[in-house]
Image: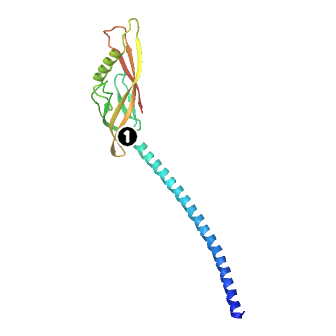
Amino acid sequence: MSNNNVEKEEKGEMAKNGNVMRSKTDHWISRGSLVVSVLALIVSGASWEFTRESNKLSASIYRQERQLVLLGDFGEKEREIIVRPLDKNKRFLQGNAFFPSQLYPSDVPIGGDGKFHHMMSVLFDIRKLIQGKIPVKKGYVQISEGHIPIIIKSLYATKGKTYEDVSLYVVQVTAVIFEESHKDPSVSFKNLVLM
């Protein structure tokens, strides 16, 4: 064999070994790139989840700052309903209340002072409904308690802007049915609760 051939073989082997070395290095570099890519994907997913949770929290805070929660007062005889905002920074402007249609078919206006109008008519219809559902028992005074759902549509102001709210409330109703059939049941309201 000539020196040239030997040199070519040696160069060929070195090139082969170099390629093997380069392929091992390339192999580790590609695996390292894969690991970095997977880590980047995991960090990206965690960032997305964090952003999503932050957005939910932000939306919840926004809603809570603007949500209207009403408290109820019922007058001396507990025969009227007057609402006022729980939050002192909110001002009730006006509204409408909607009782179940079989109880009272029309909406009930609510003034800027929070007072439900037409409550005598509402009470009259509630009494008629009670008289039709609960028979009078001679020698007994009956007391019945229940809850009436009310949808309250409100216009209110907070932080210099007006907002509209539609929420479901329930009011506790107590009825006293007297033994005298000619005497109307006594009806009173308590505890207005946001559902």
Please, which residue is most extreme toward the top here? 139
Assign the C terminus to one quadrant of the image: top left
Identify whether 156 is placed above or below 183.
below
Q: Is 14 left or right of 68, judged from the image as shown?
A: right
Question: What colouring style does the render use?
Answer: rainbow
- Crowding at label 1, few (<14), some or many (≥20) Cα neighbours within 10 Å? many
Image quadrant in which you'd find residue 123: top left
Total number of numbered discs in the rendering: 1
Measured as percent of width and height from the top left, residue 41 is found at 54, 60
Query: Foreground residue, 48 or 150?
Result: 48
Query: Foreground residue, 46 or 148?
Result: 46
Please, which residue is most extreme toward the front here? 1
Residue type, mark 1 in image: Lys
Q: Is 41 left or right of 163, judged from the image as shown?
A: right
Assign the N terminus to one quadrant of the image: bottom right
Measured as percent of width and height from the top left, residue 3 is found at 71, 93
The residue pinned by badge 1 equals 90
Measured as percent of width and height from the top left, residue 126 is found at 32, 20
Q: Residue at x 58, y 68 (%)?
A: 33
Q: Secondary structure at mark 1?
A: strand
Image quadrant in which you'd find residue 174: top left
Q: Residue at x 43, y 48 (%)?
A: 59
Query: Foreground residue, 168 or 102?
Result: 102
